[in-house]
Amino acid sequence: MADPMRIRAQAQGSGAVVRVLMSHEMETGQRKDAAGKVIPAWHITDVTATHNGKQVLAAEWGPGVAKNPFLQFTVKGAKAGDKIAVTWKDNKGDTRTDEATVS
Amino acid sequence: MKTTRRQTLQQSAAVAGLLATSGLFPQHAHAWTNAAFEAKTVPDALKAYGGGAPTESKDVTLTAPDIAENGAVVPMGVATTLANVKHLLVMVEKNPFPLVAKFDVSESVDPNFLTRAKMGQSSDVYAVAITRDGKALYAKKEVKVTLGGCGG
């Protein structure tokens, strides 16, 4: 199981700014180890977010996203106390969901 | 030069070996969810999302540094003020696979996303908005990298 994400959601104007820091190796599949063997790709492929259970964001990522990915987006109409959950899935089938409350 | 039977056999074995290794590549690439991430050029990746020939637009904004000291972590942002946008893409032209990230634009989120990308070398970076009617509008910026991010 992967390490938890750090999510901050702050009400701002008519929505909430959500900042997510995920913990993931994001191996590109381009690098070689000391023995010259290619290190297989291992990266997040799908990212989704929900606002009070309703999906608001869908994204697809390639290996070009930096290690321990950062993501910032703004959910319209989210108020303090609302729940924002973020889920990622990687190309090995691992997945993780974390939730934060808008403050 | 006369080629002996032994040489011919060695050569064909070498070719078969090459084919086998190159054959491995698409196999692991297929683990991606979308053909767009396997595309090696910007137009190919756009096509996978139904985008036509890209045109430059002032309504798409790209935030990226002029110089990235560390190519492994380059902050990049895409935003648009256009109405009927379906996807927003972040692309680094000279990466082995240019498409970095695709965000679906919905009514519930602002069409404004920030993330961090890897860059193998100095390259043009694109923010592309793909509209519902298949247009691809982009903003471009050159980012210089002083330290490579995709070591090999």
Image (spheres, coloured by chain):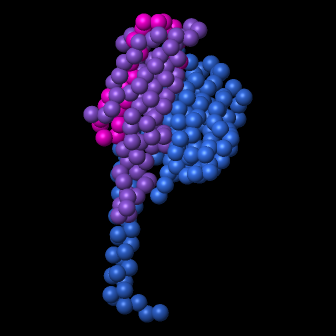
Chain colours: A purple, B blue
Say above or below: B130 vs B92. above
Residue ID at (49%, 43%)? A64
Give the left or right position of residue B54, taking residue A31 as reference: right
Q: Is residue A90 magenta?
A: yes
Residue ID at (62%, 19%)? B83
Viewer-closest of B25 and A14: A14
The stretch in magenta equals: A74-96
In the rendered image, which quarter is residue A54 located in? top left
In percent of width and height, residue B114 lies at 55, 29
Q: Is residue A14 magenta?
A: no
In the rendered image, which quarter is residue A45 located in? top left
Say above or below: A57 vs B40. above
Viewer-closest of B138 and A42: A42
* Residue at the bottom extreme, as displayed: B2
Viewer-closest of B45 and A72: A72
In percent of width and height, residue A59 lies at 46, 29
Give the left or right position of residue A95, taking residue B75 as reference: left
In percent of width and height, residue A67 lies at 45, 40
In the rendered image, which quarter is residue B139 located in? top right
* Residue at the right extreme, as displayed: B58
Residue ID at (35%, 69%)? B17
Count all numbered tags in the image, as a single digit.
Answer: 0
Viewer-closest of B18 and B71: B71
Residue B42 seen in the current view: no
Residue ID at (57%, 40%)? B74
